[in-house]
Image: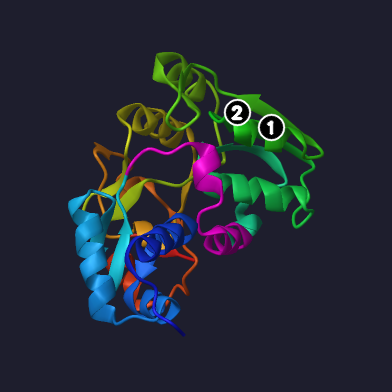
Amino acid sequence: MPSVIGAERRERLLARLDAHGVIRLDDAAAELGVSTMTVRRDLESLELEGVVVRVRGGAVATVKARSFTERQGVDDAAKTEIARKALDLVPASGSIAVDASSTSGHLLAQLRAGSAAATDLVIATNSAHNHARARTLRNTRAILLGGELEPRTESFVGPIACAAAAMLNYDRFFTSASAADGERGTSEAIIEEAQVKRELVRAARETVLLINSTKLDRRAMSAGIPWSDISIVITELDPRDPRLDALRPLVELR
């Protein structure tokens, strides 16, 4: 195919980043009709601009706070697979908490589609978007943990949200994260987000991390949840994938 040059190549790389959260050298080179060296130079320029962080085989998006609307369309296939794997962990009754992530939103969407049937389930969340989805589920009670609206992520945070999160007991807490690494656990782009999640962890019998593999081996600004507080990690990868080797001694992988 004819090669793509200059500004158009940059725009298509950024479109790939928006859609998937990652740019893979070989795939991008084939799509653009250029050499991997050309793509590598483009990624070097984007890294200098603070748009990406280069990793082996390509680059990933810089960790930053983004709205629910911006996040929900990124790497939809991976989030759908993660949600599918997590479905059987949602109890038919009792109570669960879900964070303000779009990945948790995918889990609620699959519950709505009838893949699992609730009989008497309470769902608490600090996300107006995920609360709206939970309200559409049959035989469930949706609770919105209010507080101060964080405009960058469209989630509720602050002391009121933390206090509300601590008022209930949860069978499971389903959460994603801005990033995660084998040494420190999860981390978040916003301090207040991490605070609410830690309260939900303390109130939950078990915490399940739903995370795209592109967020692994990375750190964001605020420390989140240590591995000792996470029981299960679900990614879109096969649990035997070597990219998960660092986590294998720490948690159950699905």
Residue at the spot 45% in from the left edge and 33% down from the top edge: 153
Residue toward you, 222 or 32: 32
State which quadrant residue 217 falls in: bottom left
Q: Are marks 2 and 1 in contact (CB under 8 Å)?
A: yes
Q: Is residue 102 above or below residue 83?
A: above
**Is there any visible trace of residue 99 in the rendered image?**
no
Q: Residue at x 39, y 31 (%)?
A: 193
Calculate the distance from the C-alpha at mark 2 to the C-alpha at mark 1: 6 Å
Q: Amino acid at mark 1?
A: Ala
**Secondary structure character of the magenta stretch overall:** helix
Query: Looking at this view, is 202 or 159 the one in front?
Result: 159
| The magenta segment | 64-84
Tell me what residue is drawn at x 42 percent, y 37 percent. Answer: 201
* Dot 2 amino acid type: Ala
SS at badge 1: helix
Q: Position of residue 165 (x, y in %)?
A: 49, 24
Residue 150 x, y percent position in the rendering: 44, 24
Residue that carries the numbered disc 1 in the rendered image = 132
Mark 2 residue element = helix
**Total labels drawn:** 2
Which residue is label 2 attached to? 128
Q: Is residue 4 left or right of residue 234?
A: left
Query: From what the image shows, is residue 221 above or below residue 34?
Result: above
Considering only vertical position in the picture, is 40 above or below 175?
below
